[in-house]
Every structure is written in C-alpha cells, then in structure tokens.
Image (spheres, rainbow, N blue to C red):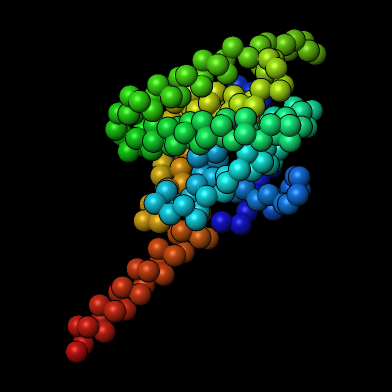
Amino acid sequence: HTRCAIKSRGLGDVYKRQVILLVMDTSSRAAFFELSGGALCLDFVNTLGDRPRSESERLATYGDLLRFSRQTDSVPADDLQELERLVRDCSTCADAVFRRVLEAREAIYRILSSEAAGDSPPEGDLEILNTALKKAMRQSELRHSGGEFSWHWGGPGQALDRPLWPIVRSAAELLTSEERILLRECAAETCSWLFLDRSRRRRWCDMSTCGNRAKARRHYQRKKARASSTR
C-alpha cells in the first residue's frame, strides 16, 4: 500500500476524505500511512497490515504514532510539538505509553473485526477500549464559535496518550452508528485491513493491491487446473 490521504473532519462527524498522494515530513523521516479505511479508528488499526506478520507493522515507535497523528490531523500541531519535547525528556515514559497504545489498537481491531464478521466482541477487549474511552471522554468539551457548537479536546496537551483520545472516540462513534453495518475486513488471506464499504460491493481494502493479487492468483490456479486436465 503506497497511497496516503488527506481528509476533512469534525470531531463528531463521520470521517471523510479524498484519497490523494501525500508525503508528510515529521521529525527525522517521512511518514507514509494509507488512510483508506473510512474512519480514523480504521486507519489506526490498519497500521498493522497483516497481523500474523510483524514486518507489516507501521507503528514501530512512539514517534511513528506522532507521525500518524500529524498526517491524520487528529492532534493539533502545538500539542504534537509538546509531545515531541516530552519524548526527548523521557523516552522511557513514552515507550510505556506506546505499549499501552498498541494494546488498545489490537483490542480495537479485534472488536471491529468481530463486528465485521457478525460475532460478539471479546469482553476483555471491550474493557480495554472502555478504559481508554473513559479517560478520553474526560478531556472532551463543547465550544461555541460562529453561532455553532463543536467538539474539542481539552485536558493537558502534554499527556502522552493524547494521540489515542480521538482514536478511541472514533471507534466508539463507529460502533454506535448505523455505518457499523458497512464494516468489512479485506478478503485477502494476507491482509487484515478493515474498511467501510459504502459501495456495498467492495471485498478488498484496495483493488489495485489485494484485489489484483487475488485476481492474479485465481487466474494462475485456473491455468494450472486446465494444464492438469489436458495431461
């Protein structure tokens, strides 16, 4: 997967975006995350593409988490700068929080994957999500500007788990919305990406990658079968 995306969003709105090629420079290197899931929480769980294979991991460090937050515009730039400073001051603190973030990511994945399959969510994973959600919701607040109300994040900008707040809220909003019936998991055997199928006929996370590989595999199998039948 090589495409990334930029999107417009409100804290309580359905995550919307137009997929385009985007290169984001953060800290020492460029970060590439493909944002094609249809919701912030889906793009987050998709940072690990094939769960049996650790080499598909896109979040290797806390710095990668900040890159994801910057690319998705889910954490304000000022807060990101403060978090980068905190990481420099206490890398062990950031590492401890990062391990909990990955634990939350996998719990969210298993919950959403179960929902996509029509199964009940694992209770332990729901507890992990609720623990993170309770902390995040304590930081949310309403603001009024231009005659309209909107959600914003308050709380301390220096909280190292700050990048997780909008993610867990996104997961809760998806699970309690009508769009949860559109939740799908990529049909490819080597891909665990989740996405919203608004077309209601999509099987693959991306037709140009997983879809084409599956078509090529089926073509090879048919060709092999024909060759065997003529012997």
Q: Quadrant of residue 144?
A: top right
Q: Nearer the viewer, residue 7 or 50?
A: 50
What residue is shown at x 76% (from left), y 28% (from top)? 82
Q: Nearer the viewer, residue 82 or 216?
A: 82
Quadrant including the C terminus? bottom left
Q: Position of residue 171 (x, y in %)?
A: 50, 28
Q: Nearer the viewer, residue 116 or 147?
A: 116
Q: Is residue 37 among what the camera can see?
A: no
Quadrant including the N terminus? bottom right
Q: Position of residue 120 (x, y in %)?
A: 30, 28
Q: Quadrant of residue 86?
A: top right
What residue is shown at x 69% (from left), y 31% (from top)? 90
Name the side, left or right, on which 63 lies relative to 206: right
- Please, is residue 161 above or below residue 18 in the view? above
Q: Position of residue 78 (x, y in %)?
A: 79, 28
Name the side, left or right, on which 200 lies relative to 16: left
Q: Position of residue 148 (x, y in %)?
A: 73, 12
